[in-house]
Image (tube, rainbow, N blue to C red):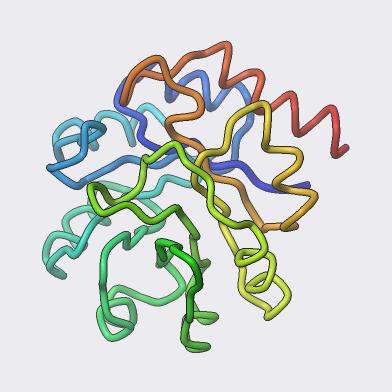
Amino acid sequence: MVKVKFCGLKRREDVEKALSLGVDYIGFVLYPKSPRFVSFDELKELVHSAGNSIKKVGVMVNPEYEEVKRALDTGIDLVQLHGEESFQLAKKIGISRVIKAFRVKDDLHIAQEWQLAYAILLDTYSEKAYGGTGKTFDWKIAEKFVKEGFRVFLSGGLNPSNVIHAVKKVNPYAVDVSSGIEVSPGVKDHKKMIAFVEALRNNLS
């Protein structure tokens, strides 16, 4: 069964809903320019409310190592590097705790060394934002990296209506959704959260 990551959570009630649905990962955006940004104080509260039964991911864009260390100290399990970070930074963090995001345009090259990371995440390229576009990309590109042996988190424009088609096409390790389960940035729609999970369980189990 493909794993599920709900990303861009800002509210405790959304964390609790994700827990009740049994998703595998929840993501918190630590990038100040994002409409889904949470401060370190907010992060501590959300991480505490999540407990230990789910993997907690801190999403960061071109951070300094000290910022990453501070995020890890709050109790997150994994760091998602969503900018142009180097492999050297990922190794310093601990490569097995890093999800490295790559934004896809027409094609993409990823160095083989990134197979050592916890996973790679493939998202739709935008000149205006790092993620959260609500748009899909050519899933053949993601399919290629799965076949090359990468552990792939598939992101970008997923929602309850298209996630099954995406999973059957790509066969990713996990699917990542943010805007596809929202009322507005950072405010999740619990009906859409339920629909997303049920679509997978009812069609892939």
12 over 151 or under it: above or below = above
Task: Name the residue at 50% across, 29% down.
Answer: 180
| Nearer the observer, 23 or 53 | 23
Question: Would residue 93 appear left or right of 179 to someone viewing this image?
Answer: left
Task: Residue 35 in the image: state x and y as whole percent.
Answer: 21, 32
Q: Residue 192 appears in which quarter of the rendering?
A: top right
184 over 43 or under it: above or below = above
Task: Residue 121 in the image: state x and y as whole percent.
Answer: 49, 60
Question: Would residue 1 appear left or right of 101 to someone viewing this image?
Answer: right
Task: Name the residue at 53% across, 46% down.
Answer: 136
Task: Residue 24 in the image: state x and y as whole percent.
Answer: 59, 42
Q: What is the residue that sits farthest to the top in this orientation?
A: 191
Question: Would residue 166 appear left or right of 114 to someone viewing this image?
Answer: right
50 over 85 or under it: above or below = above
Task: Name the residue at 60% across, 46% down.
Answer: 175
Q: Residue 97 appears in which quarter of the rendering?
A: bottom left
Task: Name the residue at 36% across, 58% down.
Answer: 80
Task: Residue 199 in the image: state x and y as whole percent.
Answer: 75, 27
Q: What is the residue that sits farthest to the front in this orientation?
A: 106
